[in-house]
Image (tube, grey):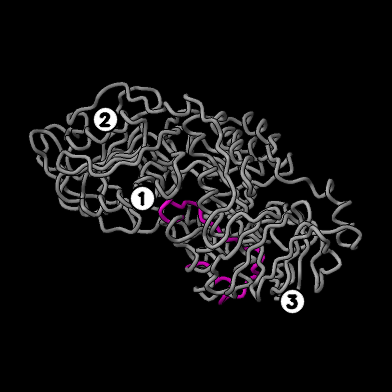
Amino acid sequence: MEQHIKSWAETAPRLVAVAAGREHADLVIQGGRLVNVQSREILDGWQVAIVEGRFAYVGPDASHCIGPNTDVLDAAGRYLIPGLCDGHMHIESGMLTPAEFAAAVIPHGTTTMFTDPHEIANVLGLEGVRMMHDEALMQPVNIYTQMPSCAPSAPGLETTGFEISADDVAEAMAWPGIIGLGEMMNFPGVINGDPQMLAEMAATMNAGKTVGGHYASPDKGIPFSAYVAGGAADDHEGTAEVDAIARVRLGMKSMMRLGSAWYDVESQITAVTEKGLDPRNFILCTDDCMAGTLVNDGHMNRVVRHAIDCGCDPVIALQMATINTATHFGLERELGSIAPGRRADVILTSDLKTLPIDVVYARGVKVAEAGKITVDCPHYAWPEKARQTVHMGKTLAAADFEIAAPAGKNTVTAKVIGVVENQAPTEALTADLPVVEGVVQGEGKTCQIALVERHRATGDVVNGFVSGFGYTGDMAIGSTVAHDSHHMIVVGTDRACMAQAANRLGEVGGGVTIWKDGKEIALIELPIAGLMSDRPAAEVAANADQMVAAMAACGCTLNNAYMQHSLLALVVIPALRISDLGLVDVTKFEMTSLFEDENEK
């Protein structure tokens, strides 16, 4: 449980005594420039006094708070900014456990995360969510958990390892680290009044907590209004200025994301920088960040820098990653600003535009300096059942990946999932493909995709086609990270390589593997739920770098193509996806045939 900090009420007597000068602070920071995100000011020379992990005094002179045992830090003219908050993210996307994710992002200045563990929910259900929640509360920074809302993400279109019920949501609302409901991806269910979706949102609101949104449709008309009426309080699926404007006009918070593959800040922040909308209703987040991004590029500091580079005022950009986020989740009296009583999460930086993260304090403790973590991030004792989650049922062969053509056909017009670089949506494409001995062949830019069932050992394989990766030669890439159902996704140009990739993942208990010309050229082992490693981020990132190089060696030129690969089964984002039940037309939320017939043309 969260043992690292007492509540404001518990510490109020000491906070008052220190602020009044009757008692002495644990730490005083002098000689800096305080960035006040409450008033949008930079206050030269303002000082802070910290006791029991909270700010006691914030003002021009904290000398009355200093005693013989007080540590005094000279900020040497640097800026004091609040610890950064990530408003929406999935820890599992980093291929790391909460402990190792925290260890990776703390040196980048992230001291608060609002996480939705719906990836593990699909594999291990409510028990898996509890494991993530419990490890999160063991960390030296603030990791709040949103109870996943949609497992499966679209009932009737996929089969998950476990399902989340309204009763599960109601139970989780009483857990100490639960801050709200995870993104409500089943927007058609909400719009159509699905009783379970409405019950989940009601349980959240009855607990006084926040309902996360996910509206992936371009329709901003009546369906969008119906969705917002259901209670979703934020949305991170916007990709254009009109999306951001539509959301804030209806009282939602527009969460603008910059992840490893999502570049949606630049296209939306003009709602603030050019249209002049109130920036209080905009929040920065990452959604999905791979370990390589965290190690090499940063986390929320990277997002804030990017927002500034897009023309946003630096202090406003900081507000979008601190006080705006805290306020949205009802925590503005707890964190998100440098103000009396709040958790003493503070960063020292020498420049507000380039945002170097010199020193990081969380709850009054120095947790990182000069890019190095200075505290431990404790690990949860993950049980064996969390490490044995890949159940294929049989050893697969090349024949399992054959796609039979309709009788008598020499060519077919196949529906093809079209990958779009740096975006979550796919295109619904078609391709005329040849038939050899009754089996449809991938050709040119079109290769095969297969979903291998891995939760119930059915041995089922669903085959289809995908384009946009640019793969050439004989190759395959397989992954047990396949949002959101997290079956196994295999993409390849050679069916024998596809079988080798699938069998290899069964052998190692999950992860990512790449095969070329019959040999494995990259492997990331993800033994926890087939989603995460409890190894350090730098080690996982090194393996991920090898994976990226291997994808390039197979002809792929897309930026962060693995993120695109991992979303090919996400049956709540248009246009075409694959599931264990077949090909899914997400524009209609219904199953569709793999081949076009004359009536469809």
| Disc 2 packing (10 Å; few <14; some 14–19; many ≥20) | some
Secondary structure type for disc 1: helix
| Residue ID at (46%, 52%) | 289
Among numbered discs 1 and 2, the one appearing first in the sequence: 2
* Mark earlier in primary sequence (2, 3): 3
Reading the image, the residue beneath label 2 is 503
Report how far apart the C-alphas of labels 2 and 3 lie in the structure. 62 Å
- Name the residue type under label 3: Gly
Q: Mark 1 vs mark 2: give the one in front.
A: 1
Residue picked out by circle 1: 542
Q: Which residue is pictured at 62% across the width and 64% down the height?
A: 320
Specify start and end residues of the magenta stretch as a single range: 267-294
Amino acid type, callout 1: Ala
The CA span between labels 3 and 1 is 42 Å
On the image, numbered disc 3 is attached to which residue? 45
Q: Element under label 3?
A: loop
The foreground one among 434 and 77 is 77
